[in-house]
Image (tube, rainbow, N blue to C red):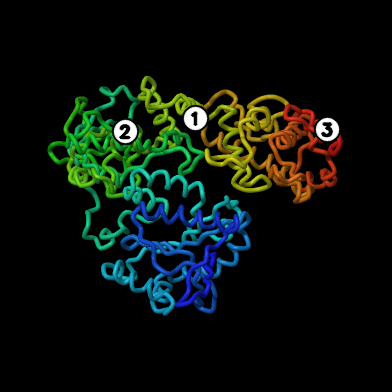
Amino acid sequence: MAQTPKPKAKVKGGTKKVKVVLTEQQKEQRLQEKEIRNLMSNIGFKRAPRIDGTQFVYEGRTSEMDDIFYYENIVLLTEYTIKKSVSSHLINKKVIYDKIKDDAGEFIKFLLTEEKFKPFADAFNTDVLSKYSIKQLQIRVLYASKYQIPSEHKLLVNNIKYFDYPIVKYFEGIAKVIKKTTKHEFFDFLEISFTKVGNNIKGTSVGSAEDFSGHILPEEHSSFKDGYKIVSFYIDAESLLKRSFVLRKEGWRNTDNVGLYQRMFVAKKMRSLRKYLHDEKRVFINNIIVTIPIDKIQLFDDNELELIIDDNGIIKNSEETKVQPTVIKIDNVSSIIGIIDGQHRAYSYYEGDDIYEPSIAKLRGIQNLLVTGILYPKNEIEDKRLKFEAKLFLEINATQSGAASGLKQEIEYYLVPFSTTSIAKYVINQLNLGGPLGTMFEQYSYEKDKIKTASIISFGLRPLLKLDGNDSIFKIWSNPKKDQLSKKVEDFALLQEYKQFSVNEIRNILIGFKDNISKEKWIMNRTEPEAMLNVTTINGMINCLRILIENNKTGDVTYYKSQLANVDSFNFKTYKSSQYRQMGQDLYNKYFI
């Protein structure tokens, strides 16, 4: 995406810039560029000079690049787009992206030798290549789209990192508060290993693991179920933060899992904590609750004998039932320590640029943070781990003012993954990823122009997905073990199979509708008079599927396309918000009888 040109007017003695009147599209473009450039600056990246919009020819392919950012040996070749439909843009870019992927180092060498990129070459040689070789660079293509890209389009070009707008906003919110410490999570998003960043790639910065002194608490003393180990130890903030992650809502991690319940940082609270650290120059007296994967640590007793823990979490070479000293060896790997409680206290040690930074920088490397870690047995499945964490978080915060009631309700909601509401939320998230209704549902708090999901879940999907009844997808699901779900048996694999089956059945009929309705109507824009997509019409189509199930008339995509051949003439707009069932019945009567 080329930068908007700045016209100049001739005047006596030279030229002067003329004020440019930007179009709305150009303003949106500038805003996107500014957001990401500010974000990268907060994280600690430098922006390469004189890159934006400059055309080049590489191996016979003409292209351009919007920005290059770099931090130590990390290089991000960045593309911006504000197009609402990016499939053609992606396809056009695929050729150059493939060439870059084939040998990213050669592409950097090309840029360094092009005369038009001399300002970049001068800065890059000074800041990067004076410390790292071309082979030591970690290069990523970052594709930043203002609008959501359906998953089927991403599959067409799968050799780049998609910097989706919700992810930009997430990291923007984090980086505004904890500044350069954001880099650890950002590198995890980029899929760049901890060992490949900066001096680590030279093998001179840190070893493969670090030791921390602490104690191990047997199950008899914790009251947790068998196999759940509790360890307490002291760690320095720097070592903790580079290994940590927090499952925050509206983050970039998998939003289908339970556990994405923690809030974003509260800037005012963080400033207060940093002031305390600066003024008092001492640690907080309460501890931080975390989880640590058992395969990322080793435990040693006071005789330096490694404690062998089996897949069920049982220590095989010790019968000790008392609290015992232990040395905890934790791998140098990013995003392995999950913070359940105490994120503000831990991250108040962030690497910042405020007046407190000189004092806090001295405290970051001192082992004075008390951490209580929960070690799961290897054979505990992820859903149960995350459910346990959510429940523990709720117990810790139940009587505190720190967690708002809405947050607590959200956790309670996720604690019941087998409920019809939870199933419906999964289904609507999947429908939003791609297909007839891809990218149309509101998922994030800042989205104001998308379809709200609460009424669709309550009046459309919940009745359709219930685990009983004559008009539910559950009726037509042929899995012989399905009755276990209705009997409340916690079989997560079986639940996932039902959820995915439901997504496919709903998507099939929606394809039948979309393929027979004109493009001018199959949109959700409230300002367009022909637009028909809203909560009412979507719930009407969902209710039509309920009636089809009730009358044993469901089918595949081909069947729905055939039956709905004339549905474009159906007057969807005559129905009010409460007439979902009536619309569904009328659709059934007109096209399926």
* Residue at the front extreme, as displayed: 12
Task: Point out residue 377 in the picture as x, y percentages from the top left corner.
Answer: 35, 35
State how far apart marks 2 and 3 are (Cα): 54 Å
Q: Residue at x 77, y 45 (%)?
A: 530
Q: Which image quarter holds the N terminus? A: bottom right
- Give whichever of 224, 283 is nearer the camera: 283
Q: Secondary structure at mark 2?
A: loop
As drawn, which residue projects farthest toward the left? 303
50 sits left or right of 465 in the view: left
Q: Which mark is residue 414?
A: 1
Q: Secondary structure at mark 1?
A: helix
Q: Residues within 10 Å of mark 1 (few under 14, many from 20)?
A: many
For disc 3, the marked residue is 586
Amino acid at circle 3? Asp
Q: Position of residue 48 (x, y in %)?
A: 39, 66
User: Is residue 238 among the parts visible in the rendering?
Assistant: yes
Between 477 and 427, the one lying in front of the other is 427
User: Type of residue at label 1?
Assistant: Tyr
- What is the secondary structure assignment of the residue under circle 3? helix
Q: How many residues crowd mark 3 within 10 Å: few (<14), some (14–19), many (20+)?
A: some
